[in-house]
Image (cartoon, grey):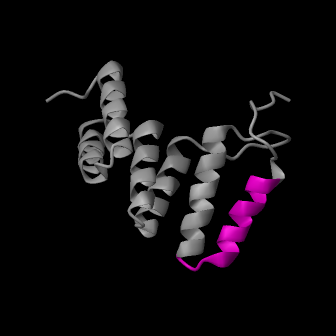
Amino acid sequence: MSEPTSRERDFLLLTVYVLARQGYVARAAVLLEALHLASAPTAEVTLGRAILRFFKRDFSNALTCLEELDRIDPLERFGHYRLTERQRMRRYLKARCLFELNEVSRAREVLDVYMRHGDADTIDAE
């Protein structure tokens, strides 16, 4: 079986979203894991895996996915910038997972970065 095309992957991600919104989180998770195994790692698939694991309160594995996502699509930048909505959500998920795993000092560090970069906006090119 060949790797799904970009269009096929987007359709499957939309299906995952619809399933999860309708309360079929287990079905969405199975489809997302299959997509993960069938294709090269992408930021969208990895973020979806992290979110579904977070909803299942599997904070340790959600954090693992977020760390993988940081390697695929790094958030860290130098200088002045503002986080996008997606980046803010990733920071929130990471802080919450760390807090739930009783890693309070690491959670504070992540929360500090979240708060320091202000409101979500487009990232400044400066």
At horizontal 39% and vertical 40% (from top left) the residue drawn is: 45
Quarter residue 86 falls in: top right
Quadrant location of the N terminus in the rendered image: top left
Residue nearest the viewer, comparing 77 with 51: 51
The furthest residue to the bottom: 102
User: Can the viewer see residue 42 in this picture?
Assistant: no
Per the picture, the main secondary structure of the magenta-coloured stretch is: helix
Question: Where residue 103 sits: x, y (%)?
Answer: 60, 77
At horizontal 37% and vertical 26% (from top left) the residue drawn is: 10
Residue nearest the viewer, comparing 23 with 79: 23
**Residue 62 versus residue 99 in the image, above or below:** above
At horizontal 77% and vertical 61% (from top left) the residue drawn is: 112
Please provide the residue range marked out in magenta: 101-115
Question: Where residue 56 sits: x, y (%)?
Answer: 38, 62
Horizontal arrangement in the rendering, residue 59 relative to residue 80 (left or right): left
Quarter residue 107 falls in: bottom right
Number of residue marks: 0
At horizontal 31% and vertical 51% (from top left) the residue drawn is: 25
Quadrant location of the C terminus in the rendered image: top right
Q: Is residue 104 magenta?
A: yes
Q: Is residue 59 magenta?
A: no
Residue nearest the viewer, comparing 29 with 60: 29
User: Can the viewer see residue 45 in this picture?
Assistant: yes
**Residue 10 versus residue 40 in the image, above or below:** above
Question: Where residue 62 sits: x, y (%)?
Answer: 45, 60
The furthest residue to the front: 22
Question: Where residue 98 sits: x, y (%)?
Answer: 58, 70
